[in-house]
Image (spheres, rainbow, N blue to C red):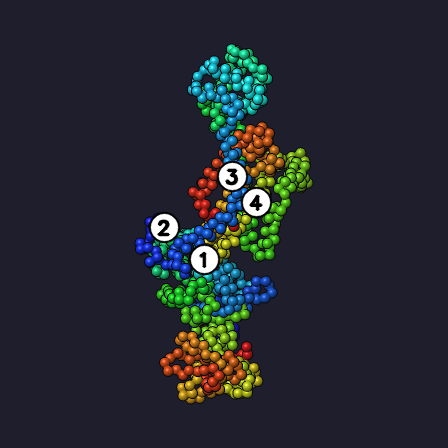
Amino acid sequence: MSKATAAARADTGAVTANDAFVAFERVQKSYDGETLVVKDLNLAIARGEFLTLLGPSGSGKTTSLMMLAGFETATSGEIRLAGRPINAVPPHRRGIGMVFQNYALFPHMTVGENLAFPLQVRGLGKVEREAKIMRALDMVQMGRFANRRPAQLSGGQQQRIALARALVFDPDLVLMDEPLGALDKQLREHMQYEIKQLHERIGITVVYVTHDQGEALTMSDRVAVFNDGRIQQLAPPAELYERPGNSFVAQFIGENNTLAGTIEQLQGDRALVRLGNGELIDATAVDIREVGQVTTVSIRPERVEFKPEMMPPGAHRIAAEVLEVIYMGDVLRTRMKVAGASDFVLKCRNTLGQRKLTPGETIEIGWHPEDARALDPV
Amino acid sequence: MADTSANGVSFAPAPAHRTGLVTADGRPLRSALARSSRRARRRAFFLVLPLLLFVLITFVVPIGQMLQRSVKNEGFSANMPQLSAWFHDNPRGTEPDDAAWAALAADLTAAAQARTIGVVGTRINYDMPGTRSLFTSAGRQARGGIEPPYREAILEMDARWGNPRLWSVMREAASPYTANFYLAAVDRTRDDQGDIVSAPAQQQIYGKLFLRTFWLSLAITATTFLLGFPVAHLLATLPMRQSNLLMILVLLPFWTSLLVRTTAWIVLLQQQGVVNDVLVWLGVIGNNQRLQMIFNQTGTIIAMTHILLPFMILPLYSVMRTINPSYVRAARSLGATSWTAFRRIYFPQTLPGLGAGALLVFILAVGYYITPALVGGSSGQLISNMIAMHMTQTLNWSMAAALAALLLGGVLILYWVYDRLVGIDNLKLG
């Protein structure tokens, strides 16, 4: 486990592998016996937590989810559910609800039959089944649709039914594999909200896989950022965004300005960085071990100011040449050349009386040294 | 806008030139659209016209004629006009009077001179076996004319002319249209009074043959399903490379001649063949217990299953390929064992392919000819072999047509039953 992950866990305090509801311990997975898709996964999930596995495709997040669901076997390591090792338990006896990317509603059954299926295979009586089905459908406001076929429902409605089916047999743990990927933007945002509400209301544990960072940030209690088969950082959304543990996380979550340089001085968590054009800036050292190390300084666009009078005392000021102004409605996205890097972006809110920048103009910008984070080189 | 008012649903009661949309050159948009879609339809029709004509000329017309033969045979009525007229004027049950015998004598003489007496005899022989010689020999004697009194003269030629059953059969044949071939095809015949009765037991062959054809076809459909289902599943789930290879193996039989494949089975399955040799060599059976696996029903089932297997696999495969594996995963995550997931989730979704494959195999099997002819022996013959026999050996085309029409009817009924049970729009061939 990386230093960043350990730090994140210390911050949130909560979960250790022993009292965790779901625990991955030293789990590895290889499909071909040569390359590891999941390398040394250690993850502890508390009961009632909403945890998101976030990462680009091929990062191992879906494989990890499938190992938890029982559709893939771990090459080595142990997966525990409620303290019980489940490596050898077949999927149908794990009692884990799952929502699939394409919903996987059985097309030859009505909505009611779809929901009855998990109850039938558990041998529940008809009366009990009906009651549970109605309760689950009401939970997702689909009570009137029990007799429809999945093909007669819209994408959002199918999504709700898939959710209801995963919940109808009262599992303690629900896995969701990019469940909103097929919906349009507005519906997706609405469903994010509903899933979050549902999670809070019934208090189940949710493990959610997505490659959409916005989704991960808005819904999760904690987010595990995956890359290259490893968890890069495991932290609550705010911490992930504001204090990324390494360059990958900084780049992957939100928009990010990077300036390459070398460490000139190191004092506690303060570092002086010599940029490519010779300029010296002050930054917070995050993933830095020694002086002389090559580094990437990361600064969020919205933390950069271009009105000197608005800048806080102690701000670092630097000259910037405006290259391009892109109108995006709520903000004006301004691309600038800063210290030799020509992809430095700054976002101006589109408010009345905002000063208009024109390409070619040279202005002075600034940021608080706290917001510049010296990370590992990209 | 004449068509608008004609169909009576015009939503714009005012004249089109005032309220309707118009094209750039001022014509009503609606009629312009209708015209362009008419033109597109006409073009499409001309494109399919050659195929339509081809099918019509080479398929629909000949089959129609063939089916007509099953109910129409003019062998008697055209060549024996006077006697046919007498039958027409006198109701059934009338004893043949002098006029009848006179008509018979005149017709026999005319037919003998026109050398069509054989045709007449053949026609009567269909309904009353053994009577052809009666006509041909009468023809030989009547060539010079028959002297009255006709009744006595004809009866003197052959006493069988007085047989009331012969007269009953001739009355049937006097009309060019007859259902007798269909009656014969279902092992029925008419007695002296013209009533429908069962054929004599030793002549009842078609019913059994139809039954055997349907049972063998069902058995072949079942074995192709049992053998083909796992293969189709493998095809649909294996990685591309292996599945392509497997697909080639499935299609390989299509690349060799049907005759070669069938005779290959003879080589394999005959009593001195490879399979028996291996079994004897392994000691499974003794040298004097060699299995009879060919020239009987077993041979027909084995060879036809092999030949028809791709027709089951391909529709199944095309349907299975579209079944997302996440359905089974979802079922398993919901608590189903793999067997339950297969039975309740996977299998029902393959039904459209299974239905298409089964229907295809069954219909092909019901009408199969070459393979049962080669490897069926006597117990593995199907109805199509009987149809072929009537076409090429007995030359009773009307009978062949009647049998073929019954086969067609049977298949259509099955098709209808399938439609009622499963729904024809659920069929998926690819």
Horizontal and vertical percent for residue A82? 45, 64
In depth, the one of A66 and B352 nearer the eye is B352
Label 2 to label 4: alpha-carbon separation: 57 Å
Q: Is residue B86 visible?
A: yes
* Mark toward the start of the polypeptide (2 vs 4): 2
Q: Same chain for marks 4 and 3?
A: yes
Label 1 to label 3: alpha-carbon separation: 46 Å
* Pointer 2 residue: B2
Among the 4 quarters of the image, the one containing residue B113: top right
Residue shown at 46% from the left, 38% from the top: B413
Compared with residue A211, is residue A88 higher up or lower down, i.e. above or below?
A: above
Around disc 3, counting alpha carbons within 10 Å, would you say few (fewer than 14), some (14 to 19), or many (20 or more)?
few
Horizontal and vertical percent for residue A159? 41, 60
Query: Could you say which disc has been placed on residue B60 in the image?
Result: 3
Horizontal and vertical percent for residue B155? 53, 13
Residue shown at 60% from the left, 35% from the top: B373
Q: Secondary structure at mark 4?
A: helix
Asked if labels 4 and 2 touch by Cβ distance under 8 angstroms, the answer is no
Residue shown at 47% from the left, 13% from the top: B98
Q: Nearer the viewer, mark 2 or mark 4?
A: 2
* Pointer 4 residue: B309
Compared with residue B50, is residue A276 higher up or lower down, i.e. above or below?
A: below
Q: Chain of mark 4?
A: B
Amino acid type, mark 1? Ala
Q: Chain of mark 2?
A: B
Q: Same chain for marks 1 and 3?
A: no
Asked if labels 2 and 1 touch by Cβ distance under 8 angstroms, the answer is no
